[in-house]
Image (tube, coloured by chain):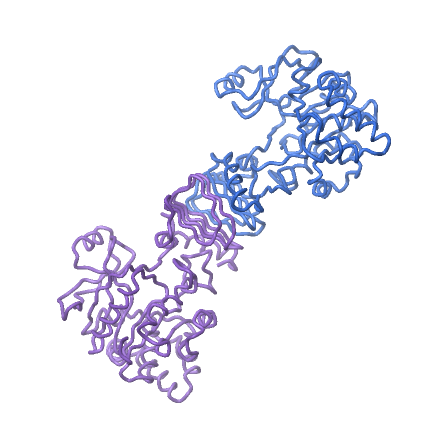
Chain colours: A blue, B purple
Amino acid sequence: MTSPHAWAVVMAGGSGTRFWPLSRKARPKQLLPLAGETSLLHRTVARIAPLIPLERVLVVTSEALLQASRAELPQLPAENFLAEPVGRNTAPCIGWAAATIRRRDPDGVMAVLAADQHVTDEDGYRAVCLQAFAAASGGALITVGIAPTRPETGYGWLELGDEIEPGVRAVARFVEKPDRGRAEAYLAGGKHLWNGGQFFFRADAILTAIASLLPELAEGIAAIDAAAQRGEEDAEVRARYGSLPSISIDHGVMERAEKVRCVVGDFGWSDVGSWTSAWELGEQDAQRNAVDDALAVLIDARGNYVRAPAGKVVALVGIEDLIVVDTPDALLVMPRSRAQDVRAVVAELQKKAPERV
Amino acid sequence: MTSPHAWAVVMAGGSGTRFWPLSRKARPKQLLPLAGETSLLHRTVARIAPLIPLERVLVVTSEALLQASRAELPQLPAENFLAEPVGRNTAPCIGWAAATIRRRDPDGVMAVLAADQHVTDEDGYRAVCLQAFAAASGGALITVGIAPTRPETGYGWLELGDEIEPGVRAVARFVEKPDRGRAEAYLAGGKHLWNGGQFFFRADAILTAIASLLPELAEGIAAIDAAAQRGEEDAEVRARYGSLPSISIDHGVMERAEKVRCVVGDFGWSDVGSWTSAWELGEQDAQRNAVDDALAVLIDARGNYVRAPAGKVVALVGIEDLIVVDTPDALLVMPRSRAQDVRAVVAELQKKAPERV
């Protein structure tokens, strides 16, 4: 068990199209059971729950997703959901959550977790969390660097600096999404990690950093905090949130702040970035087919991902390396290698059948 | 208009699996709208209707399919449906229909038509029918030979003999499904036609031939005919039909009878043999995709056949030469070249989910 001042903030306001046709505007990725039986949001909370009781878990989501998010987490106290009227990227979201925690616990230390990631080694994950809480308790801003497993060009990376204490390193610099050559060099060199977008800091420490680096945001957060103390938080959030600066915590704070540190996470992390991830993380048969829910009939079929409503027959004959995702009103078929191009389908559908997006 | 003695017999008792998942036991191929808006059965009757009034069109089907067949042909008199308690191949079916026609019209000449074929040139088709009726009226047994367009190894072929009269040829012999080499030689040689399984003969002529070549069948037909004259046909059919010899009219009669003749059909014939036929006969876009009913979103997609319930979105990205057929409870994905292997899916389903066959 970690300290009584440990909190978790789950960022669950994301929307996205990469899991169409299963994901829809009203049911984005974090609310879907991907690479597991329950939703990614539910599993994110369950994963941290052995360390932090639910009273100290906040979920920040959008107003549009509030009801669906609550349905995924019926045990979570109602006052622990923060609903953004509009998304303003991660810095306002984290600032608002930090102010909320500081009011409830002036010594609170917060883990900021994405609601839509997958972890294979949950014990290893919690061990890293404990280490990160400890490192953050002295006031450092901690990011979790993920041990890379491939030369990924779709992520930001971290360059490691000196060791500050065992397992905690300075961050020499943040690197934007690299090209293939640089990504391969980073992977080979051993001095770079993926920036996985999970953070640990004292609530007052991140608010101090925001005040110093993003004063306009700090002003807005302070106004919301003051309104909350008067019992008028909802109205203030509705009136003000949309005009907060839209900026990520990486760009706005972590890349520019003092005392930014890194702990290394090597716990089978995935950002579940596309249907290809669902195949990679799925239970594969001897022919590397992974099937979710469907009643599959696979004949000369290799390397496919199949998903359909429970009990629906999906028959593949002579099919390799395809993704087949069926829902009652929409079906997607594409090679695994084209998984990123779901976006093009959604763009086309916005014109042809926007109610299916 | 043809003679008042012209009749049509539509053989509509077939079952089959090659159009799974759209076809099911209770809704086989001839009841499906394939390569057109209405069912193949409906179109078979509509195609001949300009030549033969519905009072002289008989439909032979199975008891199991009787109701569904009637629903497809609500204008057809109820007494024109003959329902087999069990399928016994084509010779008993044709013999029974011939006896029925002979009772109603001793000079009846019957066209025997398959209920599950497609014709592109309907005027040309009817011209061939008129020629075949004329040739059959003198007592010859006429088969329609289809002008071949490819070295098909899945069909029987006819070898043409001497010309008997303009457009009517003797049949030198019937050829079982040839191997590829022979099929190519037949196609190149110009002396062979496909045996398309459509026949024209006087009802009394085919019954005489059956009496001579299949005496056991003739005896059964005679008993049913006698019972029909007593008003007891149904009971006799139920009691006796299952013990009639199960044999095709080709093997049992046409290959062995005297006075077998052939007229040449060249009217865009297809037996709609598989989902590949549905693609071939479908309306193809510039990328040779054919879509039935579905609301398709096609991105880098070429040469595909897509079918889904009306209005269902089917998105293909980077997909070539696939068949994608979706129904509410079953989905099939396979390359066009594997269309014959639907059988293997159905065989597997017989074990796993027989209610979906």
Point 51% across, 48% down: residue: B313
Looking at the image, the residue that sits furthest to the bottom is: B230
Q: Residue at x 68, y 37 (%)?
A: A41
Q: Residue at x 52, y 56 (%)?
A: B353
The reply, left or right, for residue B10 in relation to residue B208 is right
Q: Residue at x 40, y 69 (%)?
A: B13
Q: Residue furthest right?
A: A230
Q: Closer to the camera, B339 or B326?
A: B326
Instruction: Say above or below: B229 vs B293.
Output: below
- Tell me where residue B127 appears, x and y as whole percent: 25, 68
Q: Is residue B104 left or right of residue A94?
A: left
Classify residue A3 by image quadrant. top right
Above or below residue B89? Residue A167 is above
In percent of width and height, residue A313 lies at 52, 52
Q: Nearer the viewer, residue A279 or A217?
A: A217
Position in image of residue A23 (x %, y %): 59, 41
Which quadrant is the N terminus of chain A positioned in? top right
- Determine whether A110 is above or below A261 in the image: below
- The answer to whether residue A285 is visible is no
| Residue B242 can be seen in this image | yes
Q: Is residue B84 above or below residue A72?
A: below
Residue A70 figure quarter = top right
* Depth check, front residue: A5 or B266: B266
**Residue A242 lies in quadrant:** top right
Task: Report the front residue among A317 and B124.
Answer: B124
Q: Position of residue B88 (x, y in %)?
A: 37, 71
